[in-house]
């Protein structure tokens, strides 16, 4: 796409390819500038080489240009993670740092961005933004051949302490009462299914009947956050929830046909009616995974359900209740006392 600008008494035309300036030239006459721009566009359309940046003023790529190309070309390949990373990418694009030329990027500048963002958002958010930025710089340098300086070696902020949110019996009772009065009848089964399976909200809302096998008690997830598909084994309670849904929804689409935004708004209203604060829907995944371990499932078994490839990340989601572990110890045959010496 050619862009025409008047610079004093002259006309500058700039042609862009894939969002990046590909060629530019300055003319005394406007008609000459338009004619040259059209010719460069024709060359681009035919795949012929275009004239590199010409004229006295060299057009230098900005970080914003690089991030925009990353958004257009790389994020679509990330499938499930794409929308999440697009959110963090917009934060990078809005920052004043994005207006710097690539040659102006420095480690101190990135460190200043880190410190500024840490004052505004959580450390975990800053880590995600920096990870996204550094990946974009590596792709630009290794795959696009752009002159990007190696500035990724800066100190990272300390991650936030992992959430240890579990639901108490009183909270479960309050939520159950609030869900009973919910006008949207899909909210309660989604809530129950999350606790029964440990699946993410996006995975539950995108689950289709074609990927459910109630005879084998499995649910296939073709797209997940980490990019790997997985088959989730269903407990009796999870299968019962889906059994009830078979008569409430068409068997040709989603098991829980409700949009993400509609569910989010309904979930917020449920929490408000229940009088519960500091509870995220994602905390239900922590609750479910912790319950799986309390039930006695092994690490491989729980990771099969949750989809975690790294045991360390799995343990970040695990917050066992001491009283439930005590009950399990008491139920062991003979108890530990049977193996201790007597006085």
Image (cartoon, rainbow, N blue to C red):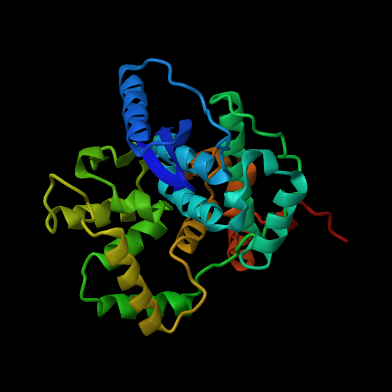
In the image, taking residue 251 as reference, residue 299 lies left or right, namely right
Q: Horizontal placement of 294 versus 48: left or right?
A: right
Whether residue 231 is visible to the viewer of this picture, yes or no, is no
Q: Nearer the viewer, residue 311 or 271?
A: 271
- Tell me residue 153's x, y (percent): 76, 40
Tally of numbered discs: 0
Q: Nearer the viewer, residue 259 or 306?
A: 259
| Residue drawn at the location 57% of the way across and 57% of the way down | 95
Q: Position of residue 22 (x, y in %)?
A: 46, 29
Q: Is residue 262 above or below residue 220?
A: below
Classify 65 as above or below 273.
above
Q: Quadrant of residue 193?
A: bottom left
Given the current orientation, which residue lies at the most extreme right position? 343
- Residue at figure coordinates x 32%, y 56% from the top left: 237
Residue 266 rendering spot, x and y as whole percentages: 30, 72
The picture places residue 303, in percent across and down from the top left corner, at 51, 41
Q: State the residue lying farthest toward the top.
A: 48
Q: Residue at x 23, y 56 (%)?
A: 256
Q: Nearer the viewer, residue 303 or 337?
A: 303
């Amino acid at each position: 796409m050619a862009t025409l600008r008047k610079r004093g008494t002259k006309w500058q035309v700039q042609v862009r390819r894939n969002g990046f300036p590909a060629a530019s030239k300055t003319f005394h006459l406007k008609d000459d500038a338009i004619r040259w721009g059209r010719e460069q566009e024709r060359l681009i359309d035919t795949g012929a080489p275009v004239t590199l940046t010409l004229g006295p003023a060299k057009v230098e790529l900005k970080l914003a240009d690089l991030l925009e190309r990353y958004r257009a070309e790389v994020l679509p390949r990330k499938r499930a993670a794409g929308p999440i990373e697009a959110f963090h990418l917009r934060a990078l694009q809005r920052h004043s740092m994005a207006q710097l030329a690539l040659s102006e990027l420095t480690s101190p500048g990135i460190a200043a961005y880190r410190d500024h963002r840490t004052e505004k958002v959580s450390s975990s958010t800053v880590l995600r933004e920096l990870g996204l930025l550094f990946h974009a710089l590596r792709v630009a340098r290794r795959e696009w051949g752009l002159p990007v300086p190696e500035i990724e070696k800066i100190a990272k902020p300390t991650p936030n302490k992992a959430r240890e949110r579990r639901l108490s019996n009183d909270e479960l009772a309050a939520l159950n009462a609030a869900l009973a009065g919910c006008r949207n009848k899909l909210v309660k089964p989604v809530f129950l299914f999350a606790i029964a399976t440990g699946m993410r909200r996006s995975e539950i809302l995108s689950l289709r009947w074609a990927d459910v096998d109630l005879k084998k008690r499995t649910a296939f997830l073709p797209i997940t956050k980490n990019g790997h598909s997985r088959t989730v084994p269903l407990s009796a309670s999870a299968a019962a929830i889906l059994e009830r849904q078979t008569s409430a929804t068409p068997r040709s689409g989603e098991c829980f046909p409700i949009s993400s935004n509609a569910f989010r708004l309904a979930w917020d209203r449920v929490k408000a009616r229940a009088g519960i604060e500091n509870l995220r829907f994602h905390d239900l995944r922590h609750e479910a995974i912790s319950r799986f371990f309390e039930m006695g499932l092994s690490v491989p078994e729980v990771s099969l359900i949750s989809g975690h490839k790294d045991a360390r990340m799995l343990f970040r989601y695990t917050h066992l209740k001491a009283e439930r572990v005590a009950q399990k110890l008491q139920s062991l045959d003979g108890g530990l006392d049977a193996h201790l010496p007597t006085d």
